[in-house]
Image: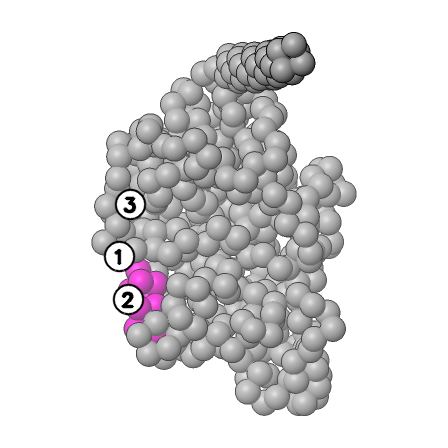
Amino acid sequence: MKNRKSLMSLLAIAGLANMVLLFVGFRTDVIRKIGNNILSSTEINHTKFNKVIRAEGEKLKGDASTYIGYNCSLPARNTTAAGNINGSAIEGLPEGKRVNKTSELRTSFSVVDMFRSIHTNWSFNVEQANRLRSDLEQYCKTSEQFVITRQIVNLDINGTLTYDGPKKWAINVTLDVYNRLPKKIPYQKGAFKKCSVVGNSGILLGSKCGKFIDAANFIIRLNMGTLYNYTEDVGSKTDLITCNPSMFASNYSRFNKRGAEKYKNDLIMQFGNATVYTTGFMYRSLRKTTFRAQDIHKSVNSDVIFANSRHISSVKEFYGQQYGIKENVVSSGLLMFSTALSFCDEVHLFGFWPFLEDQDGKPLRYHYYEKYAYMRQSHNMTEEFEVLVNLHNKGAIRLHVGKCDS
């Protein structure tokens, strides 16, 4: 009898355990279904024109000067345009690649509504352009502080220059360091009539904007965007190009013999004698590498100029105070467009479209030269874009979106 009671107790316990497992399994299944329903609702709310068009990812902390061209990419000479234009190569992209390490997804506004707000009957308004130019110059002093010059250092030889990154480190201003700096800002006020500033948005694919970009008197490109096989859409000329110095170390082995030769083939052969704008005094570990990059450029009649962290910070603060844009790091696009206003009478922007859809709701690559789209943002791109649209509609700048047919 005692054994029978023990057996019954064991069976009861086993039955209770099975019920618990069934309940847990049921709850897991319900949670999974609820999650799927939530995802479906999200997808429904973001249909066609209101899909996920902006992903605000990890916020990068630190000085605004720390990041120049954060997504700086290696331009390959033999790159082929994978997939169809308008970014159809996005199809089949594994989940998680579209948005990289995203902590927040939100639609700021309809892409189509924003596109419709861009005036197509644009005409240049000299008064508005001069007003913006004057405001920026008064606040940011681009004509004096765009890059580090010998005038800015204004120190005797063997003085010190503080690094942009960890402020506790400083570099001795030796004769070699001093001679690497230009005597004054290389671009003066009103030096060029028309300038093109070229971003890397996938909206450039199929745009046929190349000849319009190249028609400018001065051309600025961002973050080493590839030109090979894309010249019809993005042009072939370059005068100034931005890049993060970490690219020199990671992609070119800190310019050992093989890395230096690869750099010449990949970059100098592609961008001619364009000047590279980078942060030369960000970290001690990268300073020698950026100096080596400058040596390579000078050997082929080109140059590398070093960003002034004060200028970058002032541009960020200007748009924060004047337009309410709050961000840890100003984007390369906003920085260089604002800089161009200092030495260009008329500024035209191409490839400034921070969405993964075009104006017709078709998917876009994030970068025109990459097969896979991704967003790893440290900037408030939609807020920046709204400012650009506003300035375009006032006639202060020209924002080219879509095809350049005329």
Residue type marked 1 = Arg
Percent x, y of residue 395: 56, 35
Element marked by disc 1? loop
Report, in whole angstroms, how far the alpha carbon at label 3 lies from the one at label 2: 18 Å
Q: How is the image coloured?
A: one colour
Q: Residue furthest front?
A: 1
Nearer the camera: disc 3 or disc 2: 2
Q: Residues within 10 Å of mark 3 (few under 14, many from 20)?
A: many
In this rendering, position of residue 171 left or right of residue 46: right
Residue 26: image quadrant is: top right
Q: Earlier in the sequence, mark 3 or mark 2?
A: 3
Judging depth in this view, the residue of 163 and 201 nearest the camera is 163
Residue type marked 3 = Tyr
Report, in whole angstroms, how far the alpha carbon at label 1 lies from the one at label 3: 11 Å
Percent x, y of residue 262: 30, 68
Magenta residues, start to end: 260-270
Report, in whole angstroms, how far the alpha carbon at label 2 lies from the one at label 1: 8 Å
Asked if the magenta segment contains residue 268, the reply would be yes
Residue highlighted by disc 3: 230
Judging depth in this view, the residue of 374 and 392 nearest the camera is 374
In this rendering, position of residue 75 left or right of residue 343: left
**Label disc, if present, on residue 265 of the rendered structure:** 2
For residue 255, above or below residue 8? below
Could you tell me which residue is drawn at 43 percent across and 31 percent down?
95
Residue highlighted by disc 1: 77
Asked if the magenta segment contains residue 218, the reply would be no
Q: Residues within 10 Å of mark 1 (few under 14, many from 20)?
A: some
Element marked by disc 2? helix
Could you tell me which residue is drawn at 26 percent across and 42 percent down?
81
